[in-house]
Image (tube, rainbow, N blue to C red):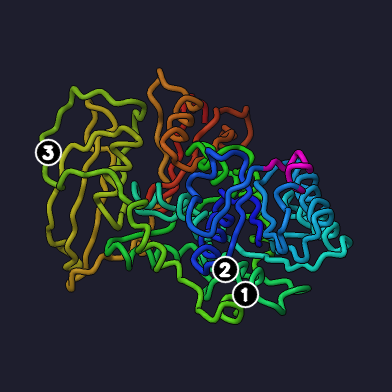
Amino acid sequence: MILVTGATGTIGSEVVRQLAQKDVPVRALVRSFEKGKALEQPNVQIVTGDFEHPETLVRAMEGVERVFLVSPQHPRQVQHQGNVIEAAQQAGVKHIVKLSTPASYADSAVAVGRWHWQNEQHLAQSGLASTILRPHMLMQSLLPMLAPNVARFGVVTLPTQDTALSVVDVRDVAAVAVAALTEDGHAGREYLITGSELLTASNFAEQLAAVFGRPISTMPINVPMWEQALLGQGVPASQVKHLVEMAVFMLEGGNTPVTNVVATVTGKEPRTFAQLVREQQEQFRGPGTQPLSPREAKPQQALAAIERVGHVALYVSDLERSRRFYEDVLGMYHSETHLPQEHPTNALLRITLCFMSFGERHHDLVLVQEFDTQGHPVPVENHGVMHVAFALRPDQTTPAFAERLKARGVPIFYGPVKHKVGPDGDGAWGGNYAVYFHDPDGHLIEVYSGMDSY
């Protein structure tokens, strides 16, 4: 008999499912029978237990030979998993397969990594046979972080940018765990589990674009901006803290090259990111959009926040997603569209969208998408304007505007802006706080108020 702790979690539930498929008797440890209903199937026995109460763990391990040890992230993880290890000793368990992390060190900058290291030391001193699994970032954890901005704006937002990630499918991690639980020869081994490819933010965008057949780009974003975006999307603060720590860990060299562990242990090649995206396309469904067409100007239409931008032309790679961003997110008014026309000097075809920041002004912002003579979009990075500053209406404040963007899941950086006045650069400091973020094509947008002294 095999006991799986954390059986309702992402990896634990998949281990239960795969063991049951192999007709291996498995016991799933859950907090309550209500939580365990989704695991009910032939060969699966549901048992209740609590990491805080060792006696329930000893009872759950009666007749168990091997244990898959995984627990939810929790400040008391060291105690919780320690209770499982001691219960296994009492119950006569022979082998524990423990899920850990590549960031498991005594002095790890990742809190969970320090906890796992302590649990691994406890397990090593317990006298029990053990196998340690160290999977890199799970694809199934990455998709929910990518999907909202891919669906709404067609952009991949990751703070790792040029850092290549060795992501892995949870089903492949579970398959390695099942092999270690059901076969001989895995005791004393540590497995660093990755997929078959290293992917940067640009690689993720390329694979998503290939699956969906539409432009997907990357949005430059730093760790603080990404942290605020996750919080704005409703991700629990404790989970955000862990994700941020892991992002920093990878940026500082904690990521590793791909390994052949999945193929060697299971006999099958690991799944790719593109495969999972095809299976999970529903996550990337964006809001419906109206077809692009010229629209009659409505000067009386009131806008939420933006007051003025002067007159700026920005080159974009997808007019639909840019219109959603500037209309739906920033509240700007889309006044008219100029359908494809030939540029007089370079024979490029271009479509333009005109925006008014508010009704009494002329076109303040123009978005331009260009195509070459073969009909291919001209890359946005071939054009120069990458920083635009917007002013808020006098009755608007930057904190309120920042909260509005966060509520919509837009990654932002909110901080002070100071300008030193005077022709020689001397004089009083003036200014206020500003909100910084990127549009879908990576243009840096600055929104500010109270900047009257320069």
Q: Position of residue 172 (x, y in %)?
A: 54, 68
Residue identifier under label 3: 295
* Residue 206 drawn above or below residue 397: below
Which mark is in front, 2 or 3?
2
Label 1 packing within 10 angstroms: few (<14), some (14-19), many (20+): few
First of labels 1, 3 by sequence position:
1
Secondary structure of residue under mark 3 = loop
Q: Secondary structure at mark 1?
A: loop
Query: Which kind of residue does numbered mark 3 sit on?
Result: Arg
Q: Is residue 45 above or below residue 230?
A: below
Q: Which label's residue is closer to the chain start, 2 or 3? A: 2
**Per the image, is 152 magenta?**
no
> At label 1, which amino acid type do we have?
Pro
Q: Is residue 163 visible?
A: no
Q: Quadrant of the N terminus?
A: bottom right
Q: Amino acid at mark 2?
A: Ser
Q: Return the residue at label 2.
A: 166
Q: How far across and down, in percent of the image, does residue 218 sit?
A: 43, 58
Q: Toward the viewer: 148 or 367? A: 148
Instruction: Give the residues in magenta.
Output: 49-58
Q: Residue at x 46, y 27 (%)?
A: 449
Q: Which residue is mark 1?
A: 257
Residue 223, image x and y in percent?
A: 59, 49
Q: Nearer the viewer, residue 354 or 53?
A: 53
Q: Is residue 310 above or below residue 194?
A: above
- Secondary structure state at the residue bearing disc 2: loop
Marks 2 and 3 sit apart, C-alpha to C-alpha, by: 47 Å
Please state the total of marks drawn on the protein image.
Answer: 3
